[in-house]
Image (tube, rainbow, N blue to C red):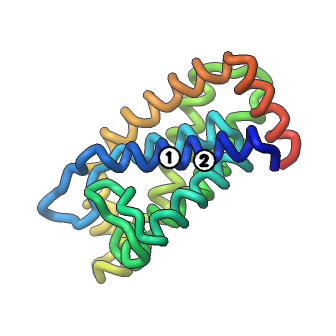
């Protein structure tokens, strides 16, 4: 990995930490808060591509596991990886990888293509891993957990839309575009 790649990975991992400073919206019926960090996952995959996007989320989770209170609400430490939101956290690197891989397979960057990937793959994949783990840890049925998780959908759609727009604008930058194309070819 080159120094520029390491810089991008660190930058997106730090951006995830900054998103964690935005206070979460706690809900009375579920311990999983509404946070802005989903936006960072989608940006990591979309801007950095599959390999670097996954690396940035992995670095972020390692820093959180080391005890840094970078998750929304000032949470950190190894204990967050056994709580109700553990599945969502574990899915961050894989979601960034999938989003980055699919977005960069399009021959042309169009906003609608990026939004389609962010909504169908990015958000869906986070739910696909997060909901069963939440169900298991909270000891409730999958169906009940899905019903609880419906409250997150409007916010996640907004975050996916915002991430798509930001990725669309950033990918036009020659430096970012060159880096993304190079990293997409190596995967």
Q: Position of residue 87 (x, y in %)?
A: 46, 68
Left or right placement of residue 15 versus residue 147 in this view:
right
- Circle 2 is placed at which residue position? 10
The answer to whether 142 is drawn above or below residue 43 in the figure is below
Q: Nearer the viewer, residue 81 or 60?
A: 60
Residue 75, disc: none
Q: Determine crowd level at label 1: few under 14, some 14-19, many 20+ residues with C-alpha closer than 10 A.
A: some
Whole-percent x and y of residue 114?
60, 30
Q: Are marks 2 and 1 in contact (CB under 8 Å)?
A: yes
Which is more toward the observer, 72 or 115? Answer: 72
The residue depicted at 74 percent of the width and 34 percent of the height is 104
Q: CA distance from mark 2 to mark 1?
A: 6 Å
Return the residue at label 1.
14
* SS type, badge 2: helix
Q: Nearer the viewer, residue 165 or 174?
A: 174
Q: Closest to the observer: 48 or 1?
A: 1
Residue at position x 48%, y 42% in the image: 15
Residue 41 is left or right of residue 135, and the answer is right
State the image coordinates of residue 176 (x, y, percent, origin top left): 71, 26
SS under mark 1: helix
């Amino acid at each position: 990995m080159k120094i520029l790649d390491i810089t991008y990975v660190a930058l997106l991992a730090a951006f995830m930490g900054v998103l964690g400073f935005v206070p979460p919206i706690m809900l009375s019926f579920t311990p999983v808060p509404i946070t802005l960090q989903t936006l960072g996952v989608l940006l990591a995959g979309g801007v950095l591509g599959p390999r670097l996007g996954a690396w940035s989320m992995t670095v972020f989770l390692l820093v959180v596991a080391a005890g840094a209170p970078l998750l929304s609400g000032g949470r950190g430490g190894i204990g967050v990886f056994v709580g109700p939101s553990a599945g969502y956290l574990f899915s961050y690197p894989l979601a960034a990888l999938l989003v980055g891989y699919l977005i960069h397979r399009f021959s042309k960057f169009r906003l609608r293509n990026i939004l389609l990937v962010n909504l169908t793959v990015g958000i869906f994949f986070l739910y696909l891993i997060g909901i069963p783990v939440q169900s298991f840890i909270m000891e409730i049925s999958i169906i009940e957990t899905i019903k609880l998780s419906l409250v997150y959908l409007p916010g996640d759609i907004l975050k996916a839309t915002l991430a798509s727009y930001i990725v669309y604008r950033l990918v036009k930058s020659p430096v970012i575009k060159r880096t993304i194309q190079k990293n997409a070819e190596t995967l």
